[in-house]
Amino acid sequence: MKPQTIIAANWKMNMTNTDAAAFAREFKRIYKGQGDVKTVICAPYTSLSVLTAEFKGTGIYVGAQNMYYEEKGTFTGEISCAMLADIGVTYVILGHSERRAKFGETDENVNKKVHAALSNGLTPIICVGETLEQRNAGITAEWVMGQVRSALTGVDAAGAARCVIAYEPIWAISKGAVLSGDKSLVATSETANDACGGIHNVLKDLYGADTADKITIQYGGSMDGINCTDLLAQSYISGGLIGGASLNAENFSEIVRKAQELNVPKGVY
């Protein structure tokens, strides 16, 4: 069984409610929902209600960019799974490199959030990836596969099959790498595929081939309308977590369209 192709937008700390509503109307106008591709818009908390309302009945899903693992209580500033599910959110990004680096998110935190998300019917998009220093030290496989194992600790096969894993090489998505034009800091499709293949092998080791083959593995290193076809054609890459290119409805729809048109088998492991 081939993994579901999932193209997810990550708006990060961008878009006001007004911006989000305008994006939704424009995206609905040009969006073509044919093909075996699932489209998700992961937005700031403040825009989630307007997006779930705008996209209701369209087949376009809405996700949050984070959440807390406790159900309720004295956790000022946090948002629970139940709060997200109540307004129609179905996906949530967990363990993004920016959350880990800037806000101290740990593997243990991510694991708790994965369990909470699954218990509340949300689909976790679990982010993993290495820094340039870790890559240069030759510990990419050890680091990334360790993040996968930690995130899924205590998760059974049925739960794992509901998860999405997003590989984001931190060294390839920094503004410095993009602006410098240093090609050595841009992941090739083969490099991305090798890492995603390693993730698949860990999933197979943990849960067996049948479950591993159901789990979408996204690539999140600056995928755009130009490189998406080559990346999505790789054997282990079955989706994308899109940053900057997702802030424009036309640009994001181009990635979704190319993903829909692409009919390259991804199940040959």
Image (cartoon, grey):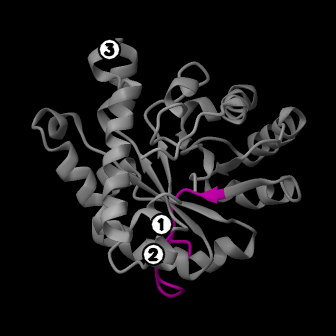
Q: Which residue is drawn at 42% across and 47% down?
A: 269
Label 1 crowding class (10 Å Cα cut-off): few <14, some 14-19, many 20+? some
Residue 109 vs residue 93: left or right? left
The alpha-carbon separation of the residues under discs 3 and 2 comes to: 39 Å
Asked if marks 2 and 1 touch (Cβ < 8 Å), the reply is yes
Instruction: Tell whether position 266 is magenta.
Output: no
Q: Position of residue 52 (x, y in %)?
A: 79, 59
Towards the viewer: 236 or 159: 236
Magenta range is 63-80
Marks 3/2 in contact by CB < 8 Å: the verdict is: no
Could you tell me how far apart the alpha carbons at marks 2 and 1 are, in whole angstroms?
6 Å
Location of mark 1 (residue): 211
Q: Position of residue 194 (x, y in %)?
A: 32, 37
Work out which residue is located at the far left of the displayed protein and give it. 137
Element type where label 2 sits in the image = helix
Q: If the image is split into quadrants, where does the N terminus sit?
A: bottom right
Say left or right for 41 vs 269: right
Q: Does the magenta run of residues contain 72?
A: yes
Of pointers 3 and 2, the one earlier in the residue sequence: 2
